[in-house]
Amino acid sequence: MKPVRTAIIALGATALCASQGAAQRAPDAAQATPAIVASPAFKQAMAVLDREHERVVTDTITLTEIPAPPFKEEKRARAYMEMLKAHGLTDVEMDAEGNVMGLRRGTAAPGGPVVMVAAHLDTVFPEGTDVKVRREGTRLHAPGIGDTTRSLAVMLGYVRAMNEAKIRTRSDILFVGNVGEEGPGDLRGVRYLFTKGKYKDRTRAFISMDGTGAGHITYSAVGSKRYRVTFKGPGGHSYGAFGLVNPMAAMAYTVSELYKVKVPAQPKTTYAASVVGGGTSVNSIPDAIWLEVDMRSASAEELKKLDARFGEILDAAVAAENGARNTGPGKVSYEKKLIGDRPTGATRDDAEIVRVAQAAAKANGYTPVLGAGSTDSNLPISLGLPAVTIGSGGRGGRAHAPDEWIDVAKPESVRGMGFGLALILGMAGVAR
C-alpha cells in the first residue's frame, strides 16, 4: 500500500520504543551518513547506478510483466530469486510463506545482526489483469509498476553498485522480495519473517521500499481493520415475494450510515466501503449479499472507536430492515468476518534509523518529510523493531489503478536511488 504523505511528527503514547535503545549502534550513524555520501566509494557506486540506469528500467519491466496477484506471487518470486542468485548473494532461498531473499555478507562475524531491506512482490490486481508495460518516452505504464515492482529492480541495482564499488558493510544486508503486502494479503509475508523466519531474531533494522518519491520517510504505522460482512435473508421472487425483508436493503443502510460518521483529520482516520457481491438474479430478492469495508487510523484509539461505531451501524441496519418489511419466512441477519488487521505504532522520531534516513535525504539534496502510512513496516514497528518505509526514487502516480505509471527520467531517478543507498549504508555501516 502507498504511504500517506502527512507530516506527523509526534504521536505521543502510540510510540513503541521498547527495543530500539538496544538496537542502536555506537555513535553516530546519522552523523556518519553525510561522510558516506561524500566518499569516493559512494560516488563510484552512484556512477554505476547512472551507467546501468537502463538495466534497472529493463528489470522493472521484466518483473512487472510477470503477474503477481494476491496469493499467487510464486512465478514472480521464483524469477526474482534467480536474479538474487545471479547477483552473487548468499543463502538465497524461498521460505515457507513464499518470501525470497538473499544475504550480502558484511565484515562482522557470521550469524550477527542484519539490516533487512524489502519490497513486496504482490500487486492489488486480480488474476487475468493485463500487465504489459507501455513505454511513452520516460514514462512506463502498467498495473503495479510503481507499487512496488520498481523497488525490486532498484534493490538489485544497489547490489551491483556496492559490488563494483567494493563497498564492504559491517552488518550483513538481507535483500527480500516479500509476499502478501497488498489487500487480502494482510502483511502475511512480513508476519512470517518476524514471527517464524530464520532472521527474525537477527534483524536490527527494517527498511521497506514502497512507491517512488524520495525524501519521504514513513515511520508511523497506520493501522487498519478490514471486514467482509455477509447479510443473509430468506430470499424470494422479486414480484411474488415483494415486501419480504431484503439483505440488500440492510447493506445499503450500512453504507449510508457509515458515510455519515465524522472522523478526525488528525490523527488521520478513514473508512471505505470497497467491494460488494452476491445475489442470485435480477428478478430475485437475494438470500445473501456481502460487503467489504476498510477502516484506518494512525491512532489505535480512533481506530477502536470507528470499529465500535461500525458494529453499532450493522446492528441498526438489520434491526431497521426487519422492522420495515415482512419477516414471516425469516429475518435478515449478518456475519462479520475480519479479513485484515494491521497494527498501529511508530518508530520514535529520534531513533537511529529515522535520523539516518533524514541525513541520507539531506545529503542527496532532499528535504526529509516524516509521515504515516500502511506498509510492510507496520509489522516490525508493532514489535518494537526500528523500521521505516521509503520510495525507490523518481516519480509515479495512479497507484492501485490500471493506468499506474512511473517516470524513469534518468537524473531524478538516479538521484532518488542515492537516498535509499545512503540509508542502507548508514544503517549497515561502512567498513574501513
Image (cartoon, rainbow, N blue to C red):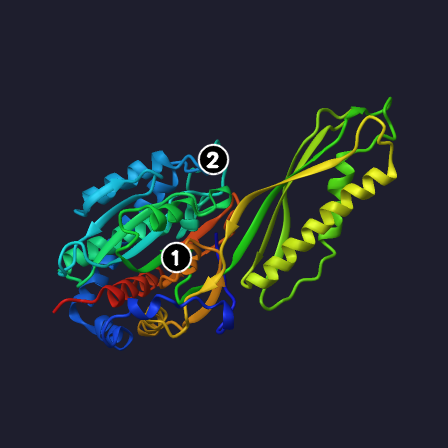
Q: Which mark is residue 380?
A: 1
**SS of the residue under disc 1:** helix
In the image: residue 46, left or right of residue 270: left
Residue 29: give x, y in percent of width and height. 26, 73
Residue 223: give x, y in percent of width and height. 52, 57
Residue 176: give x, y in percent of width and height. 30, 49
Q: Which mark is residue 130?
A: 2
What amino acid is at disc 1? Pro
Residue at (35%, 34%) from the top-left corner? Answer: 75
Name the one closer to the observer, 318 or 262. Answer: 318
Name the one closer to the observer, 378 or 62. Answer: 378
Comparing labels 2 and 1, the label whose residue is closer to the camera = 1
Q: Which mark is residue 239?
A: none
**SS of the residue under disc 2:** loop
Q: Residues within 10 Å of mark 1 (few under 14, many from 20)?
A: many
Residue 332: give x, y in percent of width and height. 76, 35
What amino acid is at disc 2? Asp
In the image, residue 60 sits, relative to residue 282, either above or below, namely below
Real-space Cα distance between discs 2 and 1? 33 Å
If you read the primary sequence from the N terminus, does the residue marked by circle 2 or circle 1 appear first?
2
In the image: residue 409, left or right of residue 314: left
Q: Quadrant of residue 367?
A: bottom left
Residue at (38%, 49%) from the top-left corner? Answer: 190
User: Is residue 356 visible in this depiction of the protein?
Assistant: yes
Q: Residues within 10 Å of mark 2 (few under 14, many from 20)?
A: few
